[in-house]
Every structure is written in C-alpha cells, then in structure tokens.
Image: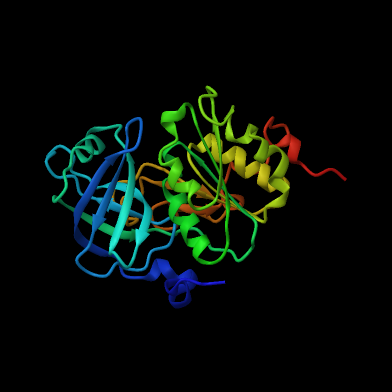
Amino acid sequence: MNIPNWICLYGNKLNSVKKVIRDLEVIENKPVGGNNFILLLKSTENLPPMRPGQFCQVKVDKAPEVYLRRPFSIHSVDYKAKTLTLLIKAIGKGTTVLSGITQGERLNIVYPLGNGFSLTMEPNVLLVGGGCGVAPLLFLAQTLKEMGIIPTILVGGKTTEDIPRLEAYRKIAETHVATEDGSLGEKGLVTQHTVFKTRLAEFKRVYTCGPEAMMKAVAQAAEALEIPCEVSLENTMACGIGACLCCVTETKEGHKCVCTDGPVFDSRNLNGWNIDKASACSLPYIKTE
C-alpha cells in the first residue's frame, strides 16, 4: 500500500502541526446544484499537511456585519498544484457573500484546524454522508485510495439537489445514493438503503458526516455490530481554536471542544450517542446470543 508522505511524517500527531494564516487566490467558484458551490483556492506556498476531516476558518470580506470567520471542512487537496477545495452551502449572510466571490479575488483563511479522521489499513470501510455533510468525505476517500484502500460510499439527501458533486465520488469508488423523495438512487434514508441494511456487517470501520440524527443512527447501527464508527460533528463554531467554548460537546471524558478535540470523534466516546436497543434503526443490527 502507498502511504502518503504526510502520514509517514506525522501519523496521529497531525493536529500538532503549526496552523497557518494565508491569503489564497480564488481559481474557481462553481455552482454544484441547489445552493451548493465549490471554491477552488490556490496558495503561492506549499500547502501544510492536512488530514481528512480537518477544517479551515474563512474570513468573509465585503460584509462588515459578518465579523466572525466561517468554518468549512476541507473538501479536497492537491499538494502538487497547491490547491484546496471547499464545498459550501449558501444558507446565511456569510456563505451567501462567499457564493458571489469571483475568480482572482483572495480569501484569508486559517488552516488546518481540528482533529481529522483516523486512517485505517483495513480494506473494507464505509463512508456515509448526508447533504453538504459529504464535504470532508471526498478528501477522505481520495486519501484512502492513495493508500490502496477503495472505500464504499453511501450518500443521501432529501432530493437530487441535496447530493452535491456525486460524480466526484463515483470517480473514486463505488458510490450509492438514497433520496427521501426517490428522485435519485433508492427512496428513503441512508440507513434504509440496501447497502446499509444488507452489507453493514462486511465493513471494518465506518466514517460519517451529515445531520446529527443521521449520524447517530449510523453510529448506533455500527456499534450494534461492534464496528468502530467515527463521526464529524458540525456544532456551531466561532473562534475555531478552543477559546470561546461555544462548540463544546459532552463526551465520556468530560466536555470537549469540537473545534480542537474534534470535529471528528469516536462515536462510542460521545454521551447520548450509544446504542438504544429500542431504536427502530439500531434494532435490526443488534447481535443476539
């Protein structure tokens, strides 16, 4: 297996790598369906090592009332081209302003921040994403592929418009889709998809990001089968460096900042995320003696 250089150098200590504040040039601003768009950003310097699941804090210019940076997962990285991509959904003032940024403008960002996904050498892994929560999973899928591991990907949303950049995931690995209205793929939730219902036991690790209810359902089903599951939380963030404490979440080790201790956590360590044997979702997966 080919192991990326940054993994060889830093391993699980990547969160200790120095963060940088840089102005990156906007190479492309491209709509990708619904209110989603991607920003392709280029650095004049070599990019720092980044782990899938980490994020950046973006300064929003042209909007004086938006005085806090906005956090976005790192969607994909090309170290040779010195570019990184962000997948963003325009849902508020800050993201709407960013959706109108043009080629040649510059964005000031702080990155890479937080703890990302742990990388396994297990051959069978499942990536589950919901809506724009799929953002960090593309970088994860790309990295796993570099390591010789081809994951299985399952993405879901309410409608077709809620499944951004599907073609990018299909270029990397077997990708399955569920939409609540049946407009694309199987009709229903990701936890109702055939792959999830019939093949979950095949996988050695599960990674998920998206709406909290979806992630809890995925995590509980995985726990029932004793499969490690990592979840990327999307708590509201302000500072991104653990100072303001607005993103704190409860874990079995006490309160943790999602921006510094996370955003990725082992679901088994999160309070309120453990298996509920009365849960309609987890019940079919619970092992019986």
- Which residue: 44% across, 43% down? 167
Which image quarter holds the N terminus? Answer: bottom right
- Display colour scheme: rainbow
Q: Residue 268 location in percent, x, y?
A: 62, 51
Residue farthest to the top? 181
**Who's the residue at 67% across and 42% down the image?**
221
Instruction: Locate residue 233, reporting x and y percent.
Output: 46, 46
Residue in the image at 63% along x and 34% along y: 193
Percent coordinates x, y for residue 197 in the rendering: 70, 37
Q: Residue at x 52, y 61 (%)?
A: 145
Res 123 → quadrant: bottom right
- Quick check: 41 left or right of 284? left
Q: Viewer-proximal residue, 87 or 221? A: 87
Among all residues in the image, which is located at the extreme bottom?
Answer: 9
- For the C terminus, the image quarter is top right
Question: Measured along the vertical axis of the image, is residue 94 above or below residue 84?
Answer: above
How many numbered marks does the figure carry? 0
Residue 284 occupies quadrant:
top right
> Percent x, y for residue 10?
44, 74
Q: Is residue 24 left or right of residue 268?
A: left
Tell me: 39 left or right of 1: left
* 201 w.r.t. 183: above or below: below
